[in-house]
Image (cartoon, helix red, strand yellow):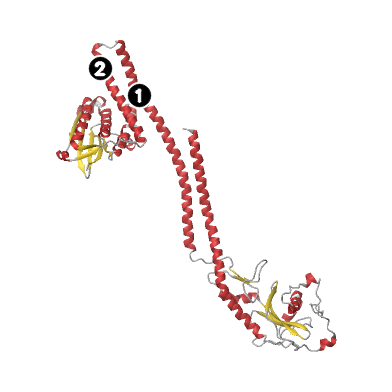
Amino acid sequence: MNKRFVFVILFFGLLSVAAALMLAYRAATLEGKLMRIDEETQCRRLVELSLPRVQAKLDELLGAEQRKLGKAPDVAAPFYAMPEGGMADFNRGFFMQSPLESAPRVPRGQEAFRAELARAGAITNTIRRKAYVPDASVMDPADELGGYDPSSQMPVFSTLPVDSAQSSEPLELTGDPGEFFAWYYKDWLVCMRSVPTSEGCAAEGFVIDVPKLVEHLRPEVAAELPAPQIGLPQAGEEPNLKGLPLVLRSGGQVNLSDSGQRAAAMRSTINTAWAIALLSILIIFALLVLYARMERRRSDFVSAVTHELRTPLTSFSLYTEMLKDGRVPPEKVADYHETLFRESGRLAHLVENVLSFARLSRGKVRGRQDAGPCTKLLDPVFARVGERLKASGFRFTVTQDPRMRLLSLRTDLISLEQVLNNLADNAIKYGDRSRRNEEASAKTEPAVSISLLQTHRSLSIRFSDNGPGMSEAARRTLFQPFSRSAEAEKGRKPGVGLGLAISRDLMRSIGGDLELERGDASGCTFLLTLPLGE
């Protein structure tokens, strides 16, 4: 076997397999990527669709709490009265932060909330800062002041200290309260507004319990989002709700109604990719097997042809030398000439078969067409085949319907005659009286019969002999090139195993066919079909 050719096959084959496997892997990973992209796109779309409803609900809840505070708080009251209507469940408490007081005022009954505010230095200081400048940053005393003194009466933004006389005077409103705005620090979410007074800006507002507020907003989220998240912004995240610094997130999950169909479509693609990979592997294996068979066939061809050529050439060399030297008795000269003639015919037949096999292997056919009445075309062919069989001691008969004279035929007579000669050679080789056992020869004379029958738009020719038939194993490989039966090998029959293979190819090249119809112990029957002429 040519190693370079095998290497080329393996190289390109492995390259194809690698490409197919890469394609299958990409297809397998593509499913996950496409699903993630689809889920992200669907999540964004569902969040965008949910935002207007959530925003409307948030505005409704937030507006209700803001309206409870009225338009003008009583900044002179010693305590902060509970607004009418109470508080919503998501409202942790109302507050009023005076510019002259260290701790915010809260409604009665919310002392615990007031204490919680007093302890949250960052919250109370930031409330004071944002009362003057709403855009002021959150002030954490632990970071900026190094501590927090709740008893400090100092305003935050460079306001002048107030003396005791001034401090005893009640605060008075000097203008309308500002618009509500919200800010957050850690888990505190504050909604407040600035209130101008005679002693500086006070702050009024309420603190929101985010988890409880979320419970009111969650029903407004699209049902396709099974785990939506609404909460305060995380690092680098921008709020997408107005009024409060809140973010509506999809939660990374989405119910896709067509996910099953998408998965099925992707599985089909993945299966196709894997099938291509497996097909590439099978193609490489098939190419290697085919090449091995071609090499074996070539080796068998060379061996068989060499063996078959050696026998007649040896006879030619020996007999011609004896005739040349005059060592053959006169009465034997005719026998020697007959032997030489027979061997020359055998050699010519072998060469013709080899040439036909080479021509058919290259896809070339003669292309010759003989047209005319069936009997006019076929009778000379049958006569020549019959002479050959009769010379070998066979009884030969041809049976045909007289109506065959009315049929016309268009075929290649040379190819047809070569096929019939090949069948006749096999009959002679295996059915010759001299090669049959004595018991069989006593009962049966070797015979070959040809019968013609018209079928639908074709002509059937049956070539039958009464030879020993063939085994089941021989029938399976009957039309394979260089295939020789065990009986032929055991009986040392001449031939290279090309006759029947060439015969079938020749019949198919002229539009017909050849098949074994019967091959039992009573003989063999081959069926030849030919298309009828117009």
- At a point 74% along the width and 84% down the height, the residue shown is 196
Q: Secondary structure at mark 1?
A: helix
Image quarter (top left, top right, bottom left or bottom right) of the C terminus: top left
Residue 287, position in %: x, y? Answer: 44, 40
Q: How many marks?
A: 2
Furthest toward the left, the residue is: 402
Residue 529, position in %: x, y? Answer: 25, 40
Q: Is residue 225 visible?
A: no
Q: Determine the image quadrant of residue 105.
A: bottom right
Q: Observer-nearest residue: 131 or 513?
A: 131
Relative to 59, residue 317 above or below:
above
Q: Determine the image quadrant of residue 106.
A: bottom right
Relative to 179, residue 499 above or below:
above
Q: State left or right for residue 154 relative to residue 477.
A: right
Q: State left or right for residue 445 relative to residue 340.
A: left
Mark sitting on residue 335: 2
Residue 338, position in %: x, y? Answer: 25, 19
* Amino acid found under the numbered disc labelled 1: Leu
User: Label 1, on which residue?
Assistant: 309
* Amino acid found under the numbered disc labelled 2: Asp
Residue 4, position in %: x, y? Answer: 50, 34
